[in-house]
Amino acid sequence: MRGGGPGRIRRVVVRGAAALAVAYLLLLVPDRAPVRAAAAESADAARARPFAWQQDAYWERLEEGYARARAVGCEAMGDEARAELHALADTVERLGHGTHAPDAPLLAEAEARVFDAAVRVAACPKLLPDAIRLAARLRDAVKRQSERWDPRDRRAREALYRVLYGSRAAIEEAILQAPPDAAPPELTAGVDEPSATPSALVHGVRVHSGDVLLSRGGAATSALIARGNDFPGNFSHVALVHVEPGTGRVRLVEAHIERGVAIATPDEYLGDRKLRVLVLRPRADLPAMAADPMLPHAAATAALVRAEAGPIAYDFAMDAQDPTRLFCSEVAAQAYRQLGVELWPAPSHVSSPGVRAWLAALGVRHFETLEPADLEDDPQLRVVAEWRDVEALRNEHLDNAATDAMLAAAEAGAPLPYSRWRLPFARVAKAWSAALNAFGEIGPVPQGMSATAALRSQWFTARHARLRARIEARAAEHLAARGYPPPYWRLVQLAKEELAASPD
């Protein structure tokens, strides 16, 4: 009789360990280098370049002006602040009349006025509600002017960005400087654009079927989506509103990295952490809308029916022309496109080689695409309402500053690394995720994302969290030393200093 004994057990253990070691080594073989879109995808892409304010000296003067106004106090300089708001209101009124080109002096005047007004209002926060309403009027006036501009003209794109993004940045800086008891209302009304589609009241805002929601998530990758393009913005996510006729039932169609296209209730949508929300509605005077006022509802219904029909994977490649997989912007774009309305009349671009390299390492293959933040500039859409809260704004500023500093490092050639020894485990997790996906479940690695890309995403998130914590500590030191929190431009400066001091 042949016995096993300890020797045989040892051989089984050794062979098992050897097999595991071989499997580990095989799974350790790296992927091929990420594909980089080196060639321009269109003539517009060939001319694209990242926007840069290049105005650090101006930001410093504004901060100095705020420090002086703050030292004087609202009682002494309240008349001056009101005069600045009056001057801004006059500029907005003039923008509402006549036709103004993107390079018209009145646009530059509006930009300067809103920053000057914000500096003084920051020292006199009781005027914040007036400043917020004026900024909303300014946005609407400039968007109406842009209806006559060529959306592919670089001058038009920069003029819109400077005023829309700039005015929001200026006013929100004033909001963040205000004491807690002077915090303005979280909800700002925009244009009550008429709509024939079914509607419902959601958290104080009447939304119509076919409305588009822009939002900003609280994850590090949300900051990357919002900031990692030629015109860094405030939004990272798009959702399409559907309101059921008769019942008023509201559902939102959106695409998530983790599970692809999904349907959410308003509470589910808001329960997924949002730092801000913007409600957009197609203009009632668009030719397609005049021909069919129910067109937005038809678009929302088509998106909802398709989402209910079966799973639609997330489009990590960011291919705006591929209808088989959808990223969040494509949900709205595809729904409206099939009915003759082309949202994003000018595509978004990512032209920085360093930023493209990072995004390529995460699976992006198309760098002429549809960025969520750029939809705000679409002249076919009116801004109906905007929600933001002070603490959310503070968190967004910290997230953005960390991201902007990291993207500056990417532009300088810094790699987007990953933990090589964890690659075999990530590949096992990817295989497990694929098995779960086959049964409609969500795994640890999103469908469509490679194991290597998942590890790079984890590295980015962890690095971002460490840098953000150090910026927050430096911001607290600034507040203790100067009596007010650092403005955004200084937060970015602090982030770059911290990143240089600890690059790994």
Image (cartoon, helix red, strand yellow):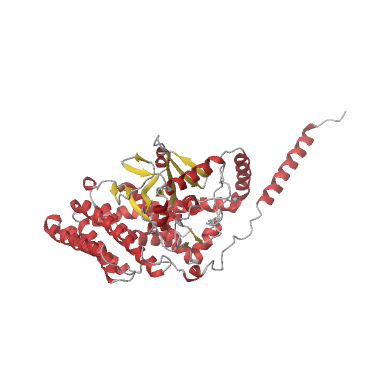
Q: Indicate the position of residue 59 as horizontal and vertical percent values.
A: 29, 65
Whether residue 221 is visible to the viewer of this picture, yes or no, is yes
Q: Residue furthest top?
A: 1
Q: Residue furthest front?
A: 291
Q: Is residue 5 left or right of residue 47?
A: right
Q: Is residue 504 left or right of residue 60?
A: right
Q: How many marks do you count on the picture?
A: 0
Residue 313 versus residue 180: which sits nearer the camera? 313
Q: Residue at x 42, y 41 (%)?
A: 269
Q: Is residue 294 left or right of residue 418?
A: left
- Quick one: quadrant of the N terminus? top right
Whether residue 63 is visible to the viewer of this picture, yes or no, is no
Residue 127 versus residue 340: which sits nearer the camera? 340
Q: Residue furthest left?
A: 76
Q: Residue at x 31, y 62 (%)?
A: 142
Residue 187 versus residue 146: which sits nearer the camera? 146
Q: Indicate the position of residue 434 as horizontal and vertical percent values.
A: 62, 43
Q: Indicate the position of residue 177 as horizontal and vertical percent values.
A: 25, 53
Q: Quadrant of residue 135?
A: bottom left
Q: Residue at x 63, y 44 (%)?
A: 431
Q: Indicate the position of residue 63 as horizontal and vertical percent values.
A: 25, 62
Residue 461 versus residue 284: which sits nearer the camera? 284
